[in-house]
Image (cartoon, rainbow, N blue to C red):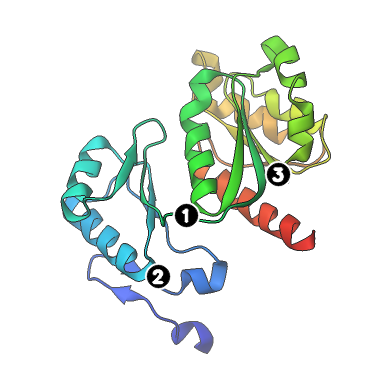
Amino acid sequence: MQFFARQPFEDMGFAKTDTHRETRQGVSEVVFCQGKEDEYLAKIYEKLLAENGEVLGTRASEHQYEVVKKAIPQIQYDEVSRILKYEKPDKERIGTIAVVTAGTADIKVAEEAAQTAEFLGAKVNRIYDVGVSGIHRLLAHVEQLNEANCIIAIAGMEGALASVVAGLVKNPVIAVPTSVGYGASFEGLSALLTMINSCANGITVVNIDNGYGAAYSAVQINRLAEKND
């Protein structure tokens, strides 16, 4: 406990930014933007950018982008993924993570995952709209799936994609249920339960719409795979 007590953090009054996180975990603190007050968000971004030379935030709105842009003119916003970031130029990326979606309605979650993984230093292969209603589309990409160190399988509706993918490859599969679907999908609960109850081996499941969480775990797997190689 004494070790952690001596490690640095920045007490800003309304937030305590973890300036030691990259040393401990290999990744600096990431901002969850949703619900944060405008003034607080801008100051947190300024602090993390000054500390790390780059900054990543998820679940940002266009309004929040405009707020942060006043403080950091070079900040970048993607309205599909809702990623709000400034990234070091010419970043080296290693390995490969495949990000796979069942449908185009899942792409916003997929892009949160893909862009997070890229920010954290991984190469990403996007394979979109290959759901089980046209499984031949997925089978056309089996070679690419097997070449990846880790696969993120993203699906709403009944969430069957993750089971099919895991049954085709030897690589770890991280399943992301999405809130896409009609009433009985219960805003992603149906897909979540399908993925948790999958009989295919090698599946790990994250929370509904949690592209960021899937990407973080996939990056850790990707780094270990490249280190072992």
- x, y percentage for residue 227? 73, 62
Q: Residue at 25%, 62% (x, y): give it.
A: 46
- Residue situated in front as seen by the camera: 117 or 198: 117
- x, y percentage for residue 29? 43, 62
Question: Which SS class for mark 2?
Answer: loop
Q: Which one is earlier in the sequence, the residue at label 3 or at label 2?
A: 2
Q: Amino acid at mark 3?
A: Cys
Q: Residue at 46%, 29% (x, y): give it.
A: 108
Q: Is residue 1 left or right of residue 63?
A: right
Tag of residue 18: 2
Mark 3 and mark 1 in contact (Cβ < 8 Å)? Answer: no
Question: Which SS class for mark 3?
Answer: strand
Locate the C terminus by quadrant. bottom right
Of circles 3 and 2, the one toward us is 3
Q: Which one is earlier in the sequence, the residue at label 2 or at label 1?
A: 2
**Mark 3 = which residue?**
150
Q: Which one is earlier in the sequence, the residue at label 1 or at label 3?
A: 1
Of circles 1 and 3, the one toward us is 1
Mark 2 and mark 3 in contact (Cβ < 8 Å)? Answer: no
Crowdedness near tag 2: few (<14), some (14–19) or many (≥20) residues, C-alpha within 10 Å: some
The alpha-carbon separation of the residues under discs 2 and 1 comes to 25 Å
Q: Amino acid at mark 1?
A: Asp
**Mark 1 = which residue?**
90
- Image vertical order of residue 62 relative to residue 156, above or below: below
Crowdedness near tag 1: few (<14), some (14–19) or many (≥20) residues, C-alpha within 10 Å: few
Residue 169 image-quadrant placement: top right
Q: Is residue 126 left or right of residue 49?
A: right
Q: Residue at 45%, 74% (x, y): give it.
A: 20
Residue 128 image-quadrant placement: top right
